[in-house]
Amino acid sequence: MKYFFRRKVPQAADILLIESGSPDVQRRALESILKLFPNARYHLCTCHPAPPPGAFASVYRVTDYPSGWSKLRLLYSFRRKKWEVLVILCTGEPILWRWKMLGMLLLPAKVLVVNENADFFWLDWGSRQALRRFLGIRWGENLDDVSHTLLRACAFPLTLFILLCTAGFLYTRRLWRLFTWKINEMEMRSPERARQGPLHRESPQLKDRP
């Protein structure tokens, strides 16, 4: 995946489509994508044994690559071809999800995500709101509420730590003030005792005077 933090759309000469799910979604999405890239060559990676109708320059059937190493070799062959755009169909069906995840990680291409309604958006930072809504629908959760809950959960230990530190500081300051007050009081009493000592010793002499 590339151009995640940029909204730049490459001038694609070759586009790889990883198809999973309903062929009707793929057909409707491809009609719209053809309007964006009318002169590009399209390559299909499909889970269906019979390729769908369409002018594809090449077709790759995942059933022809049964082992994990053969799948990785195929993905690395896609990587060496340096196709500019990767189109993945995310229709809510758990089909080829490993291919799609590994394809996004390994292929240096701009990613176009297609949902079950044949709508699509670019997977980049500028489309993060669309991505948040898409994931919220997929997971059945409001990601704004989830993010707020996670922030509150993360903030609770920090808040508790700050309160404990504040209480410890206040009690330590109070004990220090009490300790210094005791020391000062002892220092103030010691000279008085020193002055009182000679007075008691001189008192018998005063009695002997005529």
Image (spheres, grey):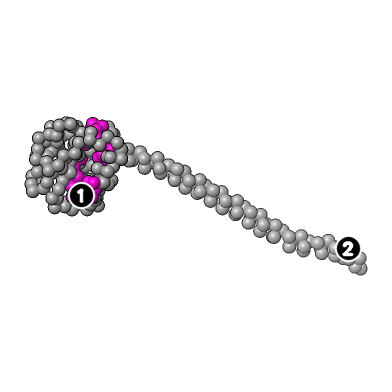
11 horizontally vs 98: left or right: left
Q: Which residue is mark 2?
A: 204
Q: Which residues are magenta?
A: 77-104
**x and y percent of residue 10 in the render?**
16, 52
Q: Is residue 104 something one can see in this rendering?
A: no
Which residue is at 13% across, 52% downward? 11
Q: Nearer the viewer, residue 81 or 96?
A: 81
Give the foreground label among 1 and 2.
1
Which residue lies under the disc numbered 1?
81
- For residue 107, side relative to residue 160 (left or right): left
| Position of residue 157 measured from the top left corner of the image (x, y, whole percent) | 45, 43
Mark 1 is surrounded, within 10 Å at the Cα level, by few (under 14), some (14 to 19) or many (20 or more) other residues, namely: few
Q: Is residue 196 above or below residue 58?
A: below
Q: Which mark is residue 61?
A: none
Q: Give the quadrant of the C terminus.
A: bottom right
For the residue labelled by badge 2, is the local secondary structure a helix, a strand or a loop? helix
Residue at the image position 9 percent from the left and 43 percent from the top: 34
Residue 21 picture location, percent across and down: 19, 32
Position of residue 118 relative to residue 80, above or below, is above
Q: Is residue 20 magenta?
A: no
Measure how far apart labels 1 and 2 are at the Cα level: 116 Å
